[in-house]
Amino acid sequence: MKNKIILLVEDNQDDELLTIRALKKNNILNQVVVARDGAEALDFLFARGAYTDRNPNDLPELVLLDIKLPKLSGLEVLKQIRADHRTELLPVVMLTTSNEEQDRLQSYQLRANSFIRKPVDFDQFSAAIRQLGVYWLVLNQGPPLNGDH
């Protein structure tokens, strides 16, 4: 499961560390790029701002996107991901503490691939991350991106 970048968009440092720990615990050894707000996530994806040296065609295999973020919400980030032809098919999993039905509904209306509520317990969280990693990074065959077709 190497060489597939995961973009983790998470402003809570504890949740960031827990997610990375859970990935490592489950032998998901992908490079994890962390964006701590919605604007940084879009800058990374579209090679803007601090990421202008990055190849914009080198997209992550998976985006783990929190909803409640500074600058731009996760829902706004998702909207912009889906609005751009380069990223419209990128797998995006909403990984959030939100329990609000409206957040879940809006996520799916904006074409999120999945909506996962973060379990509070680390063992449950670790199991959820393992299943997420196995499905999205091993089993799932996403659409061809960047001329892979």
Image (cartoon, helix red, strand yellow):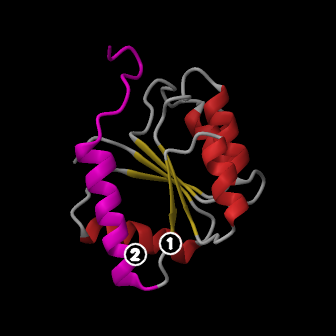
Q: What type is the residue that disc 1 sits on?
A: Lys
Q: Is residue 69 visible?
A: no
Q: Magenta: predominant secondary structure element?
A: helix
Residue 7 position within the rendered picture, expressed as x and y whole percent measured from the top left: 48, 48
Q: Could you say where residue 8 lies in the image, as x and y percent from the top left? A: 50, 55
Query: Quick check: is 131 in the magenta stretch?
Result: yes
**Along the viewing direction, whichever of 88 and 56 lies nearer the viewer:** 88
Of the two numbered discs 1 and 2 on the same chain, state the one appearing first in sequence.
1
At x 35% / y 50%, what residue is drawn?
A: 31
Which region of the structure is painted magenta? 121-149
Left or right of residue 128: residue 35: right
Q: Residue furthest bottom?
A: 121
Q: Is residue 113 visible?
A: yes
Seen from the viewer's position, the closer of residues 76 and 2 is 76
Looking at the image, residue 76 sits to the left or right of residue 4; the answer is right
Mark 1 vs 2: CB contact within 8 A? yes
| Helix, strand or loop at mark 2 | helix
What residue is shown with label 2? 125
Give residue 103's quadrant in the image.
bottom right
User: Residue 115 magenta-drawn?
Assistant: no
**How far, Cα to Cα, is label 1 from label 2?**
6 Å
**Vertical relation: 83 (above or below) 95:** above
Q: Quadrant of the C terminus?
A: top left
Question: Of the residues shown, which amino acid type is indicated by label 2?
Answer: Phe
Q: Which disc number belongs to residue 148?
A: none
- Label 1, secondary structure: give it: loop
Residue beneath label 1, please?
Answer: 118
* In the depicted structure, whether residue 65 falls above or below residue 56: below
86 in relation to 131, above or below? above
**Residue at 63% over, 65% down:** 11
